[in-house]
Amino acid sequence: MNDTVGIVIVSHSQDIAKGTADMVRQMVGSEVKVAFCGGNPDGGLGTSVSLIMDAINNAWSPKGVAILVDLGGAETNSEMAVEMLQPDRRNLVVVCNAPIVEGAVMAATEAAGGSSLDEVRAVAEELSAS
Amino acid sequence: MLETRKANGEVITGSVRLIHAAGMHARPAVKLTKLAKKFQAQISVRASDAAEWINAKSVSKIMALRAARDSIIEIKASGEDAKAAVAALVALVSADFPDTDQ
């Protein structure tokens, strides 16, 4: 079996996170692992470090995991979640500087072809560069 | 509609009419890119009237192609499996990007 980079979607909103993950699964297919989390544990808007860590572990692949985030706290909490992973996983997770929906679809498309974590990140971040 | 020929050296070309109702939008772009990535060959595409060839393995560039319905998509490839790559991509576009199990 060929490993592909996993994708994690972190939004302040559960609906946006789930909807983005649905788009990725339908457009790109099921060969890439996609996990998502959104909202705080009380069901309101927000992000949670522990839920992000769970999502990273659910999408885990030996090739690594690329995280797509929406606003401020989603990024800082994702970085915190990465820091708290077991040490051998930390260096295999990146938070992409890319728009959440477009970045997730592009990153997953790149990942489906078997690309490395650096290549997947670069494709997602192309969207911010231009 | 389907024309493949061996041009000078290793370059294989093909062209196909885009019949998709909405033209080359997001989902077809993802399918085309994913298929292109299965081949080792260097593959470029362009919409019939464009000056520039773009990398068929770059999903953002394919999506930005914005080819309209009925435009002709030209494909060229070079490398080991170039012939199979062009045939597969022409088949994908001419079959209107069918859903596959993969």
Image (cartoon, grey):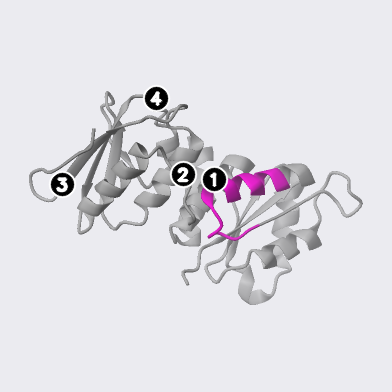
Say above or below: A67 vs A90. above
Q: Amino acid at mark 3?
A: Val
Say above or below: B74 vs A97. above
A16 and A65: which is toward the camera: A16
Residue A13 in sight from this viewpoint: no
Label 4, secondary structure: give it: loop
- Label number found at residue B69: 4
- Point out the tag, 4 or 2, that comes first from the N-terminus: 2
Q: Amino acid at mark 2?
A: Val
- Point out the tag, 2 or 3, that comes first from the N-terminus: 3
Label 3, secondary structure: give it: loop
Q: Position of residue B37 (x, y in %)?
A: 37, 53
The answer to whether the residue labelled 3 contacts the one labelled 1, judged by CB atoms less than 8 Å apart, is no
Other-residue count near label 1 (Cα within 10 Å), few / some / many at <14 / 14–19 / ≥20 = some
- Span shown in magenta: A18-34
**Which residue is at 42% across, 41% downward?**
B97
The answer to whether the residue labelled 1 contacts the one labelled 4, judged by CB atoms less than 8 Å apart, is no
- Label number found at residue A27: 1
- Label number found at residue B11: 3
Q: Amino acid at mark 4?
A: Arg
Same-subunit check for callouts 3 and 1: no
